[in-house]
C-alpha cells in the first residue's frame, strides 16, 4: 500500500504523535507525516517532530479574528503540503472543517464518546470526571471531526475495565495503551478505503 500523506495537529506533549512516528518508522502504518502543526510554540510535540525530521509549523489561535480564519490558515498549509488526511493528536482548539476535508479529519479522545466529551474535556480532566462519576468502564474513541468538540461519526472504540482504587494517572495509562491500538487501526482503515459514512454512522469494511 502506498503511504498516505498526513498532517498531525497537536497542542501538547505529543505522546500520540510519537506513537504514529514509531509506527510509520517500523512500517506497520502506511502513512507519511508531512508536517506537524501546533497551536502552541512551546509544545513538546514540536520537538518530537523535529527529532524525527518532520517539518513543523505553529499557528496560534489568538492571532486570528475568529475560528474560521484560524482554520483557513491551517488547511491552506495542509493543502500546500499535499496532505489528504489530518490527524488530531491532543489538539485543543475548535476547527472549522472545509468541505474538501469533510470525513478527512480524525481525532482520538480518551473516553467512550459521547460520554465525557465536549469543550474543556481533555487529558486528565476526562479521567478525573470518569472516576468522579464512578464509571466502571472507560476507553477511547476515534471519530471523524466536525465543527463541534468531540463530535462527529465514530470510527473505532476500545474499552478498559476500571479497577478498584484506580487513580487518574492509572486510568490515563490504561486508556493510552488502547489509544496506541485504536488510532492506527482507524487510520489504516481510512488509508485502505474501508470507511464509509452513512446517516451519521461509519461502516468499516473488512480487510480484503
Image (cartoon, grey):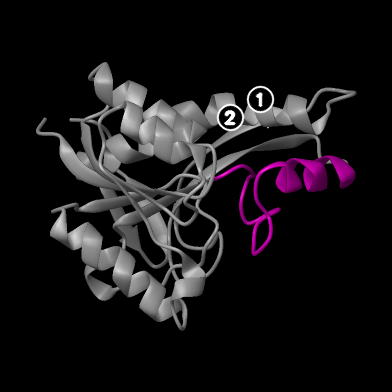
The residue tagged with tag 2: helix, strand or loop?
helix
Residue 115 sits inside the magenta stretch:
yes
The residue tagged with tag 1: helix, strand or loop?
helix
Check residue 12 in the rendering and tell me which mark sits there, or answer none: none
Magenta region, mostly helix, strand or loop? Answer: loop
Tell me the residue that label 2 is attached to.
Answer: 176
Residue furthest to the bottom in view is 65
In front of the other: 132 or 82: 82
- The residue positioned 36% from the left and 30% from the top of the image is 20
In front of the other: 103 or 6: 6
Where in the figure is residue 175, as x and y percent of width and height? 63, 31
The quadrant in which residue 111 appears is top right
Tell me the residue that label 1 is attached to.
Answer: 173
Q: Are marks 1 and 2 in contact (CB under 8 Å)?
A: yes
Residue 165 sits inside the magenta stretch:
no
In the rendered structure, the answer to whether residue 193 lies left or right of residue 132 reads left
- The residue positioned 84% from the left and 40% from the top of the image is 131
Q: Which residues are magenta?
A: 109-133
Query: How dense is the environment of label 1, judged by Cα within 10 Å: few (below 14), some, or many (20 and up)?
Result: few
Position above or below: 84 against 50: below
Amino acid at each position: 500500500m502506498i503511504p498516505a500523506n498526513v498532517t498531525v495537529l497537536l497542542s501538547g506533549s505529543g505522546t500520540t504523535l510519537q506513537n504514529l512516528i514509531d509506527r510509520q518508522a517500523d512500517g506497520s502504518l502506511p502513512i507519511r507525516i508531512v508536517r506537524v502543526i501546533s497551536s502552541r510554540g512551546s509544545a513538546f510535540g514540536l520537538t518530537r517532530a523535529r527529532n524525527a525530521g518532520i517539518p513543523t509549523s505553529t499557528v496560534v489561535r489568538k492571532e486570528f479574528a475568529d475560528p474560521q480564519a484560524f482554520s483557513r490558515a491551517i488547511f491552506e498549509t495542509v493543502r500546500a503540503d499535499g496532505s489528504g488526511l489530518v490527524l488530531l493528536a491532543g489538539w485543543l482548539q475548535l476547527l472549522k472543517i472545509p468541505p474538501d476535508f469533510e470525513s478527512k479529519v480524525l481525532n482520538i479522545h480518551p473516553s467512550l464518546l459521547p460520554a465525557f466529551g465536549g469543550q474543556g474535556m481533555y487529558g486528565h480532566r476526562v479521567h478525573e470526571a470518569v472516576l468522579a462519576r464512578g464509571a466502571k468502564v472507560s476507553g477511547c474513541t476515534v471519530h471523524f471531526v466536525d465543527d463541534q468538540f468531540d463530535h462527529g461519526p465514530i470510527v473505532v472504540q476500545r474499552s478498559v475495565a476500571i479497577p478498584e482504587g484506580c487513580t487518574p494517572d492509572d486510568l490515563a495509562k490504561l486508556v493510552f495503551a488502547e489509544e496506541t491500538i485504536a488510532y492506527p487501526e482507524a487510520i489504516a482503515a481510512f488509508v485502505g478505503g474501508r470507511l464509509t459514512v452513512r446517516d451519521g454512522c461509519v461502516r468499516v469494511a473488512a480487510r480484503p
